[in-house]
């Protein structure tokens, strides 16, 4: 999933509703690309933390792709104590398993 533009108090409710739909089962494996995000405030961090909490079920996880310095500083702010799995680029595709 790719998020773009501004993730703030005005746009967060719509994004939260969408992520809630994706994480309903609790075992979603989400990779969210934040590279096109121009601005994100604490409302954006809260919605990502909510999605992470909802994916921490049996097989779920949330990973973020982020390279923008300001966004990384916000996500790594020591007072927030968030431990997001953050990648700087798309991971390499996993080759399909061949049955023997």
Image (cartoon, grey):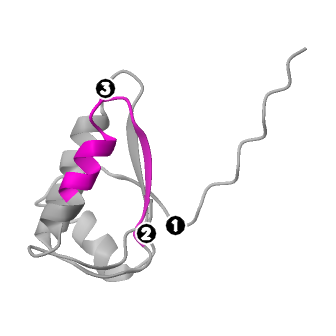
Distance between mark 2 and mark 3 Cα atoms:
24 Å
- Highlighted magenta segment, given as a residue range: 16-34
Confirm whether the magenta stretch covers residue 28. yes
- For disc 3, the marked residue is 57
Does 87 sit left or right of 9 as displayed?
Answer: right
Q: Secondary structure at mark 3?
A: loop
Q: Residue at x 37, y 69 (%)?
A: 3
Q: Residue furthest right?
A: 100
Q: Which x, y percent locates residue 32? A: 42, 58
Identify the disc placed on residue 66: 2
State whether residue 74 is above or below residue 68: above
Q: Nearer the viewer, mark 2 or mark 3?
A: 3
Identify the disc placed on residue 88: 1
Distance between mark 3 and mark 1 Cα atoms:
25 Å
Q: Residue furthest bottom?
A: 38
- Rendered-image quadrant of the C terminus: top right
Q: Which x, y percent locates residue 34? A: 40, 69
How many residues crowd mark 2 within 10 Å: few (<14), some (14–19), many (20+)? many
């Amino acid at each position: 999933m790719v998020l773009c533009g501004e993730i703030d108090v005005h746009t967060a409710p719509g994004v939260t509703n969408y992520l809630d739909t994706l994480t309903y089962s609790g075992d979603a494996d989400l990779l969210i690309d934040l590279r096109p995000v121009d601005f994100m405030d604490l409302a954006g961090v809260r919605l990502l933390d909510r999605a992470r909490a909802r994916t921490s079920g049996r097989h779920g996880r949330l990973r973020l792709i982020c390279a923008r310095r300001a966004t990384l500083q916000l996500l790594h702010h020591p007072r927030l104590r968030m431990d997001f799995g953050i990648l700087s680029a798309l991971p390499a595709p996993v080759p399909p398993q061949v049955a023997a």
